[in-house]
């Protein structure tokens, strides 16, 4: 019976041909540390990748992109405003001629709650860091998946839609003719939404502050 050929064991560095020393050189150079022991360290993309056809620009994996330079509140406001405008376009503009006003307001709130639950909040979670900076722009910022937030978001945005409708009634009755259209409707939704979220955030901060004071006094 023929003996099976024994496979020679090798380290993972040899198996994958990893250039660990090159990685150390690059990390040291990026951190601004002394790299004299490694000799001259090139930061060119072509030298780092070994591809002669690659770009001659310098490699910097820690460089921030354009979106990361935009303040969080601007990104949050734009996303919430844009999606609210989409809801107004499809519901108010699309169904307005066929649905009664009261039913249309409820539909606005229901679809806005669905969009926030399914699209806006998950997008915020995708964009946030470990600091949870988008929590200040979410009404129910729970990190875990809870089905009850689906219903609370729908109910909450129905209330928001009702208030938005009263704002339009007030303006049309006491000020001037103000027709519903996506840009202004979304802006009023954003303002009312952030007022409620701001009140909620302020309340939570006051409760946490009081608990810290009680703990420190014990």
Image (cartoon, rainbow, N blue to C red):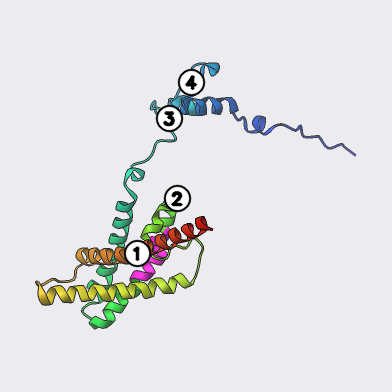
The image's mark for residue 131 is 2
Query: Circle 4 sits on which residue?
Result: 41
Task: Work out whether residue 64 or residue 97 is closer to the camera in this orientation and state it.
Answer: 64
Residue 148, how many percent across, how many down?
Answer: 47, 72
- Which of the two discs, 1 and 3, labels the residue nearer the N terminus? 3
Residue 176, how many percent across, how many down?
Answer: 9, 71
Q: Which image quarter holds the N terminus? A: top right
Label 4 crowding class (10 Å Cα cut-off): few <14, some 14-19, many 20+? some
Task: Work out whether residue 115 or residue 198 is closer to the camera in this orientation and state it.
Answer: 198
Label 1 and label 3: CA atoms lie apart by 42 Å
The image's mark for residue 165 is none
Mark 2 or 3: the one toward you:
2
Query: Circle 3 sits on which residue?
Result: 59
- The extreme front residue here reads 217
Kindly identify the residue that appears in the image at 38 percent across and 58 percent down: 136
Label 3 crowding class (10 Å Cα cut-off): few <14, some 14-19, many 20+? some
Q: Is residue 121 one of those drawn in magenta?
A: yes
């Amino acid at each position: 019976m023929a003996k099976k050929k024994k496979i020679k064991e090798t380290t993972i560095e040899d198996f994958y041909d990893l250039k660990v020393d090159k990685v150390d050189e690059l990390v040291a150079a990026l951190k601004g540390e002394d790299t004299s022991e490694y000799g001259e360290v090139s930061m060119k993309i072509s030298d780092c990748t070994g591809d002669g056809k690659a770009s001659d620009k310098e490699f910097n994996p820690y460089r921030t992109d354009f979106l990361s330079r935009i303040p969080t509140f601007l990104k949050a406001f734009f996303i919430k405003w844009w999606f609210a405008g989409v809801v107004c376009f499809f519901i108010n503009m699309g169904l307005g001629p066929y649905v009664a006003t009261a039913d249309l307001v409820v539909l606005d709130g229901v679809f806005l709650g669905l969009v926030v639950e399914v699209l806006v909040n998950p997008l915020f979670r995708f964009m946030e860091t470990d600091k949870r900076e988008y929590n200040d722009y979410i009404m129910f910022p729970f990190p875990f998946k809870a089905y009850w937030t689906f219903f609370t978001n729908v109910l909450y945005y129905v209330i928001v839609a009702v208030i938005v409708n009263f704002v339009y009634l007030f303006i049309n009755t006491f000020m001037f003719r103000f027709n519903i259209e996506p840009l202004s409707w979304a802006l009023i939704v954003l303002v009312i939404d952030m007022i409620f979220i701001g009140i909620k955030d302020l309340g939570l901060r006051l409760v946490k502050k009081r608990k810290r004071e009680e703990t420190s006094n014990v």
